[in-house]
Each structure stands twice: as C-alpha cells, then as structure tokens.
Amino acid sequence: MTKRDLSQGLQSFFSEINERDLDFIVENFFDILKSALLEGRKIELRGFGRFEVTKAKPYFFTNPKNQQKYYLKDKVRAIFKLGKEFKERLNAPFLAGLDIGTQTIRLLLGKYYAGEVYFLKSFRENVRLGEGLGIDSNISPQARKRALEVLERFKKVLEKYQVKSYYAIGTAVFRKAKNAEEVLEEIKSKTQLEIEILPPEKEAQLVIEGVLYGLKKLGLNLKNFMVVDVGGGSTEFIYFKEGSPEGIKSLEMGAVVLKELFNIRYPLTGRALQSIRSFIRDQLKNLTERSLEKIVATGGSASLMGSLDLKLNRYEPERLNGHIVTAERIERLIHKISEYTLSRIKSIKGMEEGREDIALPGLLIYSEILKYYNQGDLLITTYGILEATLLSLVKRYNNGLTKEKT
C-alpha cells in the first residue's frame, strides 16, 4: 500500500474532505512519525503496534572473498513490533463466503476474532450465468465456461489465503435451470467446490441476516420497513414489523430476466420503456400494500444504483452503505440511460463493467417499487446475502460444527 492508496481509502470514510486535503493529511502524518523517530522517540499506535529506535553496536566484518576485515560503525535503525491484538488477528484463519448468482459470482474473505467478524477482502465477476436461460431453461455452454473460469480463479484465491472453511451458495439461476445438477457436478469435478442451492425462503433468511447486521453497523433501528434485493433472475421482498421479519415474497423478475424478456436494445423508445414499466407494475400487484417507514435496497443492482448516483470511480462499500437515493434521482438516471447507446452507457461515471446492459432494468424495478409503496427514496446497504454466508460460518464455528472444505 502506498500513501496514495491510504489517501484513497480514507476518502471512502471521509467523503466530505476533498482528495487534496486528504493527501496533505497523510503526508503530514508520516512527516510527524519521521520527525519523532529522528528525535529517538518511541511511537505507539494502540491496537496496531509500536515503532522504536534501536542502536546497533559496532562490529568487524570479514569479506569472505579476500578475508579483508572492515570496521562497521554503530548504526541507528527504526524497528516495528506488532501489537498483541493485531498479531492475533493476523494469525486468525481466513473464512470465505461464495455467492453464485444469475449475474455475478462474488467471493468474500473474512476473519472471526474476539467475538467480531471482519469482512476483509472481496472479489466479484460479472459472469451472466443466467444468460439465455429463458430460451430453453438451460444454463448455456458459454455461461458455464465463463463461470468455471471464474470459480477456478477463486479457488486459487482460497488456496492462497489457506482457507479451510467456506460456505458457497447458488440462488435463482440454479433453481430455474433444468441442467443445474449437471452444472454443479462439473463445478465440483473441476474446482472441488461444493455449492448449496438455496430455496427462496432460505435465500431470504440469509438476506435478512446480512441486512440486519448492516443496519446495526449504521446505527439504525428501523421498525416497519421492507428489504428489496433485485437480483439477475428474481427479486426478493422481505417485510419487517416492529423490527422482525413478518413476510417474504419472491418474484421471478430480475434485471437479466427483463433484459432478455424484452430483448432490450439501446437507446430505447418511449413506447418500449413504458411497456417494461407496465410489466413490472403488473408483477408488483402480487405484493401486499402496506405503510412503510423505509425501503432498504441490497444486492448488486442496489450497489450499482448507488455508484451511479454518487458517480464513483470504483466500488466503495463504505460510501455506498447507508446512502439514500431519491425517486427523482432514479428517474433522472433512467431517462439518461434509456437515451444512450450501449457504448455510451459504459462510459457513465459509476457504471460497473459487465452491468451496462442490465442497469436500466434494475433501476426501473426500484423506481416502480417506490411508486407502488408511495415512497420518496430508499436506503442502500452493502450488507446482504454474501456477508451472511460468513456470519453463518461463524455461527457454525462457535458451535464447533464447521467442516473443513477446500
């Protein structure tokens, strides 16, 4: 990590401070450390470690080639010693969660230490495993090939970090595909990865666990609200009453499904846009109307919506988590994207590579949901089903039930 990397990392936590000021702060921080060490002072960073200045004694050195002796004067050097807590955290084993969805395959590495779960490193690839699923209800050979290539890379990541315990899940794409078992056998044969295919109820339960954890991190105590996860193949709706889940509904209406169902081509005509909206509205009639305190959005489509709204140059979960997007700003994004060509959509600030053709369907679903429930905005959380896979592993770990899987 460089000073620049550190400055960019801080930008995620302190978005109100501009980059130039953060660069200045980081530069001055290291100048202060340097000055203290030059003065021979000890620097202690609680929970991290300490820097100390030591003096090496002078000694004679013999050149092995010609046996010439040299006198080396005493030297002053700075050494760093890890703090006990940090050292224990470094030595804690890595855990991993793997989410194989209709659009994206995601991997999350984390650790469990002293009663806390640390989400440390994430990887994501837009594979579009569900591409063409609506044609013959099969995962296509091309999609299988893309998924296997990514999973083989992710398996190497697990090996690199010496992961012994992982939880891998598959969602809507495997529930729908007629050749799901065949694909799973091929994945297991080539990567040794075992994947659990979740029924809608268990998928929703994991979403609940992840979202509630994220809301707690934000310090929010919502009572009557709804969580929405717009995936590639389906959309999950979870209702909460007095802070507890009351009902779960899954609609087979996702960003990839809509893109293929309407054979969306960019730019869209007003008539085509209205047709997609009408379809979404008809699907939403299957939901129960109720008064909500807030709508909470989670998942890839929600994160993309937040990135587009914030015009992010890269994925920044710290800035996205807790971000509120208004219905008006969603409509502006819909209007812009619908009038652009696909190549121009790719260049929009905040657009994630591989999602440019399904960004609009996802936005339309969220827009119509806000209208259906008469809400003016929604709150984005970056915590969801992927984070819940790690939380589930920790529960098993605590109960002594975690099986080693590699």
Image (cartoon, rainbow, N blue to C red):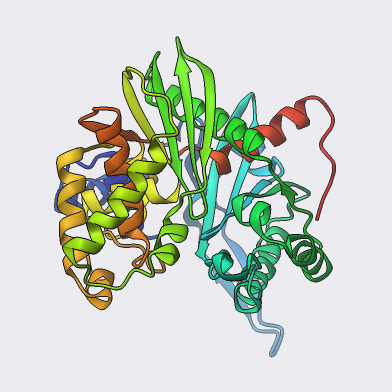
Residue 43: which quarter of the image?
top left
* Residue 247 percent across, percent down from the top left: 53, 22
Going 15% across and 48% down the picture, which residue do you hit?
Answer: 18
Q: Residue at x 43, y 63 (%)?
A: 261
Work out whether 330 lies above or below 391: below
x 52%, y 48%: residue: 252
Please tell me in which quadrant of the rendered image residue 138 appears: bottom right
Question: Is residue 111 depicted above or below 20 in this figure?
Answer: above
The answer to whether one can see residue 349 in this image is no
Q: Residue furthest toward the top? A: 242
Question: 284 left or right of 307?
Answer: right
Task: Give the image location of residue 235, x and y in percent.
Answer: 48, 43
Asked if residue 196 is positioned above or below residue 66 in the image, the reply reads above
Residue 255 position in % (x across, y down): 42, 56
Report the front residue among 290 and 362: 290
| Residue 338 figure quarter | bottom left
Farthest residue to the bottom: give it: 66
Query: Quadrant location of the N terminus?
Result: bottom left
Is any atom of residue 184 visible in this view?
Answer: yes
Quadrant of image for the C terminus = bottom right
Q: Which of these two is toward me, 101 or 386?
A: 101
| Image location (x, y in percent) of residue 377 | 23, 33
